[in-house]
Image: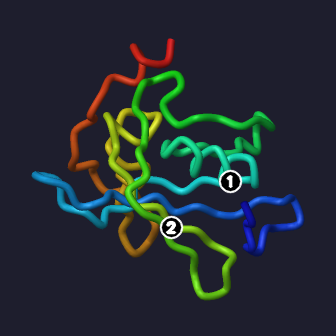
Amino acid sequence: MELDFKFTADDLIPAIVQQAPDAGTPGGRVLMFAWMNREALQKTLETGLMHYWSRSRKKLWLKGETSGHTQQVVRWFVDCDRDVLLFEIRQTGGACHTGYGSCFFQELDREARPLPVTESKTFDDKTVYQ
């Protein structure tokens, strides 16, 4: 498989992960951002499940390998510069390791102060990640 994309000097490419429209679930919400290397991208395309590269742990990981909250690829895109990927996925459970549906649950005001979180967690992160 030829992956003719512009990877960083660390051989990574940014991946934006967005909710695909589905029966009862509106699409378009950004669920998370992560990094992929060539192996993560290949595994994602082979299995249809999102795989990422953890920069902190220096290892490949399957989204949901601990929590069971997997991400199934519906379709994917590359930007015009070929240096960012966008995946539309079907999320099982929450996307955020803190228990929320999206990693982008914390709204800020114009002075960068956090506003009250208005959504509920989709799962209890303390019981999932013991």
Badge 2: residue crowd in 10 Å (few <14, some 14–19, many ≥20): some
Q: Which residue is mark 2?
A: 86
Residue at point 70%, 63% (across, down): 13
Amino acid under disc 2: Leu
Q: Is residue 104 above or below residue 111?
A: above
Q: Is residue 11 left or right of residue 96?
A: right
Q: Is residue 25 above or below residue 124?
A: below
Q: Which residue is mark 1?
A: 36
Q: Is residue 25 left or right of residue 18?
A: left
To which quarter of the image does residue 79 belong? Answer: bottom right
Between residue 2 and residue 76, name the one nearer to us.
2
Q: Is residue 81 above or below residue 20?
A: below
Mark 2 lies on a secondary structure that is strand
> Residue reaching furthest right?
9
- Quadrant showing the N terminus: bottom right
Q: Is residue 36 above or below residue 70?
A: below
In percent of width and height, residue 96 lies at 43, 41
Badge 1: residue crowd in 10 Å (few <14, some 14–19, many ≥20): many
> Residue reaching furthest bottom?
80
Count how many numbered circles sit on residues in the image.
2
Amino acid under disc 1: Met
Q: Is residue 89 left or right of residue 3?
A: left
Residue at point 23%, 61% (across, down): 21
Mark 1 lies on a secondary structure that is strand
> Residue reaching furthest left?
24
Give yes or no for contact between labels 1 and 2 (Cβ–Cβ under 8 Å). Answer: no
In percent of width and height, residue 99 lies at 37, 33
Q: Gap in Å between the C-alphas at discs 1 and 2?
A: 11 Å
